Amino acid sequence: MPPKTVHAVCSHDCPDSCAVLVTVDELGRATRVRGDASHPVTRGFLCGKVAKYLDRVYAPDRLLYPMRRRAGVAKGPLAQGREAEAFERISWDEALHTIAERLKTIAEKCGPESILPYSYAGTIGKLGYGSMDRRFFHRLGASQLDRTICSETGGQALVSVYGRKLGTDTEAFRHAKLILAWAANIHGNNIHLWPFVEEARRNAAKLVVIDPYPTRTARAADWYIAIRPGTDSALALGMMHILVRDRLYDGDYVERWTHGFEKLRERAAEYPPERVAALTGIAVGDVERLARDYATTQPAVIRLNYGVQRSDNGGAAVRAIAMLPALTGAWKHGGGGLQLSTSGAFRFDGEALERPDLMLASPLRRPSRVVNMILLGQALTELRDPAVKALFVYNSNPAAVAPDQAAVLRGLQREDLFTVVHEQFFTDTADYADIVLPATTFLEHKDIQGAYGHYYVQLSEQAIAPLGEARSNVWLFGQLAQRMGFEEACFRESEDDLIAQALRANAPEKQHPWMKGITAETLRAAGGAQRLQFDQEQPGAHFQPFAEGPFDTPSGKIEFYSEALAAQGIDPLPAFRPAAESRHVAASQRYPLEFLPRKADNYMNSTFANLEVHQEMEARHRDALEMNSADAASRGIADGDAIEVFNDRGRLRLKAMVVTGAASVPQGVVAARLNWNKLSVGGHNVNLLTSQRVSDLAGGPVFYSVLVEVRRVD
Ligand SMILES: Nc1nc2c(c(=O)[nH]1)N[C@H]1C(S)=C(S)[C@@H](COP(=O)(O)OP(=O)(O)OC[C@H]3O[C@@H](n4cnc5c(=O)[nH]c(N)nc54)[C@H](O)[C@@H]3O)O[C@H]1N2
Ligand SMILES: Nc1nc2c(c(=O)[nH]1)N[C@H]1C(S)=C(S)[C@@H](COP(=O)(O)OP(=O)(O)OC[C@H]3O[C@@H](n4cnc5c(=O)[nH]c(N)nc54)[C@H](O)[C@@H]3O)O[C@H]1N2
Ligand code: SF4
Ligand SMILES: [Mo]
């Protein structure tokens, strides 16, 4: 084979969905990965995590063969490299046979709903994220999983206001004159937006960051506003208060395109700057200045990210922030508006991929019950009728990323729970498996992908043969379906068939105008990526959603007031409500510090945490709790001291990292980062302290509403 360059797409759960060029040598080995310079958002560079991707693909501890737990070995944490003491290698044939027989028996004895699939966004490729797997579990009649762990609260909030998850075009940020990075760690989580921010700043734009944590983005800003966690709804309502009071809103846009302004005006009246200052910790003068700057600078754009919605009141907060550009009419100005997600622009055929109709062919003959993924701890320890008897994990590492870890691990430890884990590495979750199966990386399988941070569809070609006996998600669930005796033809379809279905390539008349004519062939001819074909788009112009209606909401307008939410018993207007665990609630004052259990800048949730190069980049923050010097001093804690961080759910052993000056967390706030449990000092990561409470909308998690206390240990 001659050497070649293959267009793949980074499939990690990141807004940027980078175009990756993989160099493959004559032996079929990938020798280099780089960002595609011809992709307008990737612009020829990759983040620090994926620039070192070959260290992941070819890591000596990649999981390469199916394995089975040895008889008599209890479930639980295994030291890295010692997995062979607990697991023995088996063939794929035996693995598939064992799994199929166990699932059949469990479905017959306890009902198919006692089987729970558990997956999230290990890959966001359309096929790998949800296609053959969903078909398989639908046909089986397994419980459905409500995938709430990341963005459902904010996503549904945005949809309640605008009807669709669209946002300002990433490439249009260069035209903005004011950029608010609101809970948006651009340097850490969304680095391909940064060059557009820099370009705007070269043209005199100002960058304002609103975040309780002093991220690198915050430190690079023109103005950094350290807000108290969970109080963003108050700030946004306070800004509205000022916009209305000083008549700084766009009356014409509001009149034409919005619904419920009068009611919103009354609600905003309850948030005078003094009250907002007391709630948010931001000075009255700063609230005033922020509102005025925002309303009087055009184009103004908000890069809202998902940090604000990981809180009890997160849905209301996202709704309130999302309403700001509708009040000022910022959507009318090229480069103005707001971006939370662009994913609603990609009109793939999800039903064809996932086939929810197959539930009617299951033994239940009806849609099966739905389990909220963030309540995994409860599902494994308390759920009945039926209790969960089998757990099938892929694309996720719940032992590390799910909240209320003690409950999750108690569940995973059950010897009567049959657990399968399909993975690239021996994760914390794999330690609790009965059967472990090896998964491919995005270099080793084919897929099709949209994005949530730009507007390009991309084809991800398979660059190299799977390592060892690694197999893709599509292959695995297709094979299992055969073993279960599922006869529907859809279980024998290839990755190419699925890609064609996702694009509706065989039914052009059903293609959405934005995806018209896009097929695997046109994508290939275009070098792997094609921009969505927005109808209102002039050549060279940017996509400007929401400049005018009609909107996909029940009223056809932007909804300040939502009857649909009212019908669900949810406040139809945004409001500030304190999180159950916050400094605003007296009952929880026993734990006085607000805890931010953050994502690591150099890992992707728990992914990459086991790789040495990534650990080196993250070294300063590993096993560290960032504290303000005042909070440290009042507890007799010095930088580097061994400490314990605790609340009713658990105790973590960390070391104090006392930072002073601009890089310090605010007083009253402490922060630590996600890691694998078994690579953490005390055997647990930050999720030991997080709770299974759900947010105000869509049952999302409240990772960032956690109270703790800290003490020095000797
Ligand atoms: N390097 C890296 N990149 C990633 C990931 C990763 O783990 N590492 N994860 C990926 C994933 S899964 C996602 S969903 C995306 C998006 O990820 P985001 O949801 O944007 O990431 P977070 O870091 O959770 O939150 C963004 C910022 O919100 C801040 N924040 C927390 N609470 C509040 C609050 O109450 N108010 C305000 N104003 N800010 C708050 C946090 O301090 C953080 O800096 O990023 C992806 N990219
Ligand atoms: N404390 C705290 N907890 C959090 C967060 C936080 O900010 N703080 N963030 C939350 C958020 S936003 C999210 S999205 C979740 C993320 O939670 P998860 O979706 O569980 O994300 P990862 O930890 O990245 O784990 C993904 C796993 O999928 C595997 N994988 C990758 N590709 C494939 C594939 O093709 N096939 C298979 N079978 N496996 C694959 C990877 O090896 C990896 O172990 O975590 C949440 N948990
Ligand atoms: S993780 Fe994000 S920034 Fe990094 S290569 Fe993948 S898509 Fe690009
Ligand atoms: Mo996420």
Image (spheres, grey):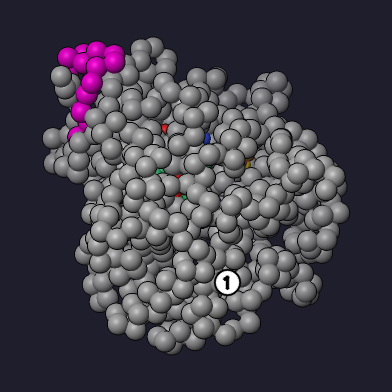
User: Can residue 17 be spotted in the picture?
Assistant: no
Does the rendering let one see residue 478? Answer: yes
Q: Position of residue 526 (x, y in %)?
A: 84, 51
* Front in this rendered view, residue 471 or 402: 471
Question: Measured from the top left, where is residue 143 in percent x and y?
Answer: 38, 72
Residue 436 magenta: no
Residue count near mark 1 (Cα–Cα under 10 Å), binned few <14, some 14–19, many ≥20: many
409 relative position to 565: left or right: left
- Front in this rendered view, residue 285 or 584: 584
Q: Amino acid at mark 1?
A: Gly
Q: Quadrant of ligand 3?
A: top right
In the rendered image, the vertical position of residue 681 relative to residue 318, given as above or below = above
> Residue beneath label 1, please?
478
Span of residues in magenta: 631-646
Q: Is residue 398 above or below residue 644?
A: below
Residue at the location (16% across, 42% down)? 648
Q: What residue is shown at x 46% (from left), y 28% (from top)?
A: 615
Residue 302 point in image, percent of width and height: 56, 38
